[in-house]
Amino acid sequence: MQGGTPLKNIRAQITALGMYVPEKRVTNDDLALLVDTSDEWIRERSGISERRIVSEGQANSDLSVKAIENAFKGGDFRPEELDLIIVATVTPDMMFPSTACIVQDKIGARNAWSFDLSGACSGFLYAMATGAQFVQTGMYKKVLVVGTDVMSSILNFEDRSTCVLFGDGAGAILLEPTEDHDVGIIDFLLHSDGAGGKFLYMPAGGSLHPASHETIDKKMHYVHQDGRNVFRHAVKLITEVSRDILERNGYTADDVNLFIPHQANLRIIQSSLERLGISPDRVVINIDRYANTTAATIPIGLTEAHQQGRIKKGDLLLLASFGAGFTWGSVLLRWGDI
Ligand code: UT7
């Protein structure tokens, strides 16, 4: 849970980033043809207007590879220089091998080792903190962290309370060492509370309920959520974990140049902003276009903000997430050179 003091005075900094969302757009009106819902309800209750959904045959690793390619577009990327690839996801291509190994093969990172990390909507921050450890110890020079999910593969398009909320997408960052202590990852603060597991989960497909006719008939291979309960916890814990990381590093909300929260519901983001006292012009919001892409929301938000020129060298960025598990966390960093 503790960020800890970097060994050898090395910090991990983001030196490349990219994102990818599938081309296929699904609007609220499209979903209203499938379930009893409306564009008005979805916009008002969640802030979502549309989401992107994979085409047939397009897997999680395909999205990840495109995000990675976009991160290194025009640059001098040598995949064989990568030391480690961490893929945060709850919708891997298959149970095993890991999507990270599939991605490693697809991009030709033959000298890396690779693994998946399951942290749901907090997966990217968990993976970022994990990857940063290998950089901060001086062990590794290039760690690739991917947040990616194909939520449409586990959505019940007959359940209006969940199918309208999620979308598909991927984002990737490269972490490299720096001895410049004015930039890079300053701290992270991560939590989990397994008692919250029953409020957001996919019941079947694992060892508890292996796939069977019964699990399929009972629609156990889909996302199940107690939305109100998750909402309440999300607002409280995103606020707390953001406030805590600022306080323990001697910052206030006024010091934050850009807040990049997980995108699960516009009302969760707005409530957290109000409670934290961060002004609305200093937050990244793209839930209207992509819905909740689970592990991908934060790297997508980060990449878009960077592309839009909203991040400059020296800016203090606060990232925060909440999701299934329950899992939640925050990362504080100062932007360096890309
Ligand atoms: O990233 C992982 C974390 N996930 C989240 O953070 C999601 C957290 N939860 C939420 O975002 C919200 O709770 C939802 C968007 C899921 C639901 O919003 P809500 O304001 O909490 O609505 P509700 O669940 O209290 O439902 C209100 C009503 C219900 O009808 P009754 O019981 O009042 O008659 C629902 O059946 O809205 C109904 N409803 C819908 N109506 C039209 C639920 N889904 C829909 C729908 N269209 N899609």
Image (cartoon, grey):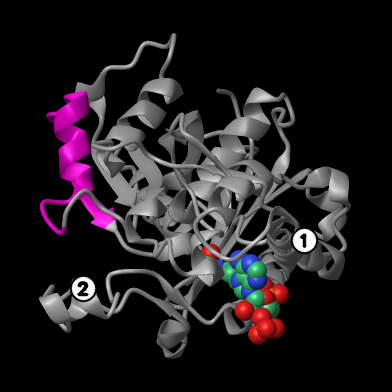
Residue 60's spot in the image, x, y percent?
30, 43
Pick the front one: 61 or 212: 212
Q: Quadrant of the C terminus?
A: top right
Q: Give the range drawn in magenta.
A: 95-116
Image position of 31 (left or right of 251): left
**Sooner in the amino-acid sequence: mark 2 or mark 1:** 1
- Classify residue 213 by image quadrant: bottom left
Was residue 114 drawn as part of the magenta stretch in this picture? yes
Q: Name the quadrant where ligand 1 sits.
A: bottom right
Q: Nearer the viewer, mark 2 or mark 1?
A: 2
- Classify residue 139 by image quadrant: top left
Q: Name the residue that disc number 2 marks.
A: 216
Vertical order, 247 against 153 (above or below): below
Q: Name the residue that disc number 1 marks.
A: 44
Residue 147's spot in the image, x, y percent?
41, 47
Kind of residue indicated by mark 1: Glu
- Look at 44% across and 90% down and name the residue there: 195
